[in-house]
Amino acid sequence: MDGIDFKVSEGLIKPIIETKIKMAIAEAMGGHEQLLDHLIEAFMRQKVDSSGNVDDRGYSGSKPRIDYLITKMMETAMKSAIEEYLAENLEIVRDAIVRYFKTKQGSARIITAIQEGLCKSFADKWLTKIEFNMQPRER
């Protein structure tokens, strides 16, 4: 008996089978929406490190991804707001800084910063060279 030889390529059948399997799993879990809800919840609760990378080791510093993302978004928003404020009020901020540095506390902080910087520089193995040029002010 001669039969009909019917061939269907794997490339045609495989996607259909995969789709049917995915639909069956989604249906067993209560439908697509519930499946997505579970996936999203698991993703957002996943522990991440301070760089947002998945924390597979379980370090105590890890936190849920949602906390990490919210923190990053808040930092970005605050940075943007501060940059905008400073750009709009540059003269006011500059004048306030100058007033602060004219106080004893402000000038003491400048001197301390210079002193600490010089001490660290001298401790370094690289050559440190300091020049002071004193000239009378022209009138």
Image (cartoon, rainbow, N blue to C red):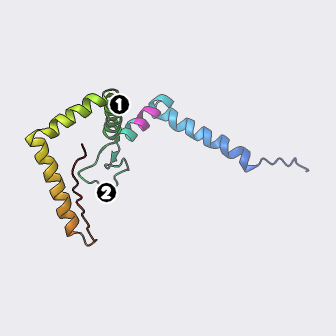
Secondary structure mainly formed by the magenta segment: helix
Magenta stretch bounds: 36-40
Asked if residue 92 is among those painted magenta in the image, a careful observer would answer: no
Which residue is at a point 19% across and 61% down the rendered structure image? 118
The residue singled out by tag 1 in the image is 87
Label 1 close to label 2 by CB (< 8 Å): no
When asked about the image quadrant of residue 81, the answer is top left
Dot 1 lies on which element?
helix
| Rendered location of residue 136, percent (x, y) | 21, 51
Residue 31: tell me if it is visible: no
Residue 114: tell me if it is visible: yes
Residue at the far front: name it: 139
Of circles 1 and 2, the one toward us is 1
| Rendered location of residue 2, percent (x, y) | 91, 50
Task: Give the Cα distance between marks 1 and 2.
Answer: 43 Å
The total number of labels drawn is 2
Depth order, front residue of 50/88: 88
Dot 2 lies on which element?
loop
Q: Is residue 20 left or right of residue 135?
A: right
When asked about the image quadrant of residue 99, the answer is top left
Image quadrant where one finds the C terminus: top left
| Rendered location of residue 49, percent (x, y) | 32, 50
Q: Identity of the amino acid at label 1?
A: Ala
Q: Identity of the amino acid at label 2?
A: Arg
Depth order, front residue of 33/29: 33
Which residue is at a point 32% across and 41% down the rendered structure image? 68
Disc nearer the start of the sequence (1/2): 2
Relative height, residue 20 to residue 54 (above, below): above
Depth order, front residue of 138/94: 138
Q: Residues within 10 Å of mark 1 (few under 14, many from 20)?
A: few
The residue singled out by tag 2 in the image is 57
| Rendered location of residue 74, percent (x, y) | 32, 33
